Amino acid sequence: MQIKESAEVYDVIIVGSGAGGGMATKQLADAGFKVAVVEAGPFFDPADPKTMTQLKNPYDSPRRGAGTDRAFGEWDMSWGDWEVEGEPYTVEEGTKFRWWRSRMLGGRTNHWGRISLRFGPKDFKGKTRDGYGEDWPIGYDDVKPYYDKVDKLIGVFGTNEGLENDPDGFFLPPPKPRLHELFYIKGAKKSGIPVIPSRMSMLTKKINDDRGVCFYCGQCSRSCSVYADFSSGSCLIFPAQKNGGQVKIYVNSMVREVTTNEEGKATGVSYINKEDRKEYKLKARVVILAASACSSARILLNSKSKQHPNGLGNSSDLVGKYLHDSTGASAAGFIPGLMNRKTSYNEDGVGGMHVYSPWWGNNSKLDFPRGYHIEVWGGMGQPNYGFGFDANAFNEFFGTKVGGYGDILRDDVKKYYGSVVGFGGRGEGIARKDNYCEIDPTTVDDYGIPVLKFNYKWSDLEVRQAKHMQDTFSELIHNMGGHQLWGGKPGKDSDYGLHAPGEIIHEVGTTRMGNDPKTSVTNKFNQLHDVDNVFIIDAGPFVSQADKNCTWTILALSWRASDYIIQQLKEQNI
Amino acid sequence: MDRRKSIQTIILGAGASALAFHGCKVDGDDKDKALTKVEETKYFGRTPEELERLEKLQAEQVFNEHEMETIGVLSTVILPPKEPHGGPIEAEVPELIEFMAKDIPEMQNTLLGGLMWMDHKSNTEFGIEFKSATLEQQKQICDEICWHDIEVPLDEQPLEIQFFALMRNLTLTGYYTSKVGIADLGYKGNQPNVWDGVPQDVLDQHGVAYDPEWIAKCVDQSKRGEQAVWDDEGNLLT
């Protein structure tokens, strides 16, 4: 079968349409360049009534929102989850990794939590801070101007608190706390844990004429039909097109490899069209990979040639290495003070928390490096499949019988509605060379492309951090006058409830940046050391995760790299 | 990718957003129009693959007529109807159980076996199938299996105990995810709204208060439609 080659030469090919790819599309198209966006999934627009799940009622579906088809529930706007049909991955025996992929325009930005935290000055200098890992080749001051621009372009609510490692920004005003969040604030105060308004990318106020303002349905995970939350398609790619940009989107197109010429420079990509299952080639002056940290590493490793026998950009042998996800542990408490609630009002709010706790600890007094932030959930949410299970289980805490039947169950359901508060600790694990993904030569996906094999183990440092999370959660539940749920506090035998690597869906680090080509894959502008017309602008170049979520930094670094690419193209350096 | 299509959707999005921020006239015409648009579709946001699987499941049948009737009767014993919000039948609980038994087939053995157990028990005790027994007789059977030792994991308990617990869960979840059940619960969300904090009477009831300093930083909802402008230090000016 002959590979079909397009005669058209783009200025830039961008592989992937999530946060990194969307931002580069916007910047490069706005600068007048001809851009091809290659996305492995179908087209998606949150405003399309055909695919929309926002404002659906549980009874619109025969399964009432159950998560049988979608791991995070039937309404979650992610096409693909821990498994994608026809696209397997493998895991080394004795290690763990779970990999979430969204196959659709906009990728995972369509359903993410919108927790939009800047990394702080300390987060770029991990090794200097405590000796673990490596420093980034850039610091907060390099990224700050881009964080500022991202805030203003996309919109994020929050407050300027003057915190050292949780920098201020250009915030929209936050929503008021909900009832359970007031309980949380009070409980945290007793333990000296700070609580501040959340920093999330929903529009609590107008930022431009193209996007709507939040109408507080609490369903950002369903992707907002009025574009009031940040999703890459609705907030970056469509505006780039609307602005007159030359943006051609190839959907259902699974990139196999970056193609190169005799000199070893990239000439474009080859991809499989999922509809006709044939291989095609696209040509460009610059290739940008934004397929997500692991998928971009996979493409590089699969791009073997005479000039790049070890895979593209892999002379350091570090592509796929230093893979790391956020640490995570969870707990929930039943809070009697939140019983017997009035349902006289709508407290959906924004999708997710209105308050959170940034890291407050002093590591010199702790047995682990780095920190974590606390996310909090609860409230009188929309009932979906699962609501009303074990309706009076909390009777246990009052010494009354659990179970039964009859009219009393109605009272039980209402008595306990909205009385649970949950906590998620999201922290920083240490990047290690021996946690990695690599090509599994024994397995291919449905398109014939060799798949990834993961090899990842937490160390004692992450386990100790999880223990600290659990101790904190138990203390918070106690402070709130509550009872711990889910079988009580997890112990050493379960690594204190530390989630398996990958489960927090913040995987980063597989093509880390640095000044030395021997110890890093890209330079400080996300450009491959080995091939100057290939850039990686997802979370692959992260040297370290922080106790923050990675999206805001992906966006800022993608913008920064795009500026560099624009300059390099104009000066004809690449 | 059809560029025109994407432009159309942008316009649609912007139009819809205008509804959202003019408004918040929650009972106004605008909202109704927006919602009708949503309700016109029968898709509830499924992908073609998901629709295909749904149709496949819907073509199958797990419970026969007798079993469906027994489920209806038992669910009504578990959660008797109550005016004005009805009960499991109005909430289509039997239909949900039929669907979920196909969607999560691991439940089938417990449900089918449990239904057989109910009839066996009723026939043995009263010489009549469960669904035709008197309410008193039905309750007598349920009383024996509706409590369980919470110290022992459910899946280590006798099948009839597991069955009843599962039926109670499915009945309650079916009811409270239905239109009538949501009305009974009083849930007010899943519609356009302007969140402006917890009402004072609710704060009072639960003994908490807003910190005035905190509230001062929060969104002034009367200015949500005014475009954000900041000074160079990040102070919001509008």
Image (spheres, coloured by chain):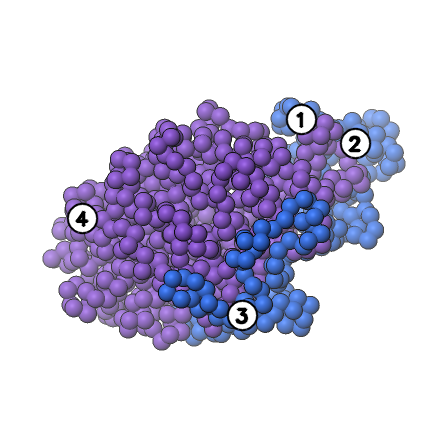
Chain colours: A purple, B blue
The percent coordinates of residue B68 (x first, y second) are 74, 43
Q: What is the distance, in whole Å, between disc 4 and disc 1 at their CAs?
A: 59 Å
Q: Chain of mark 4?
A: A
Q: Are marks 3 and 2 in contact (CB under 8 Å)?
A: no
Residue hosting label 2: B142
Mark 4 on the same chain as mark 1: no
Of the two numbered discs 2 and 4 in the rendering, the one whose residue sits closer to the viewer: 4
Label 1 Cα crowd, 10 Å radius (few <14 / some 14-19 / many 20+): few
Say which amino acid is labelled 1. Answer: Ile
Say which amino acid is labelled 4. Answer: Asn
Judged from the image, the secondary structure of the residue bearing numbered disc 4 is loop
Q: Are marks 3 and 4 in contact (CB under 8 Å)?
A: no
Q: What is the distance, in whole Å, between disc 3 and disc 4 at their CAs?
A: 46 Å
Seen at 31% across and 60% down, the residue is: A145
Q: Are marks 3 and 1 in contact (CB under 8 Å)?
A: no
Mark 3 on the same chain as mark 2: yes
Q: Of A487 and A267, which appears nearest the observer?
A: A487
Residue hosting label 4: A515
Q: What is the distance, in whole Å, between disc 1 and disc 2 at their CAs?
A: 18 Å
Q: What is the distance, in whole Å, between disc 3 and disc 2 at their CAs?
A: 57 Å
Mark 3 on the same chain as mark 1: yes
Residue hosting label 3: B225
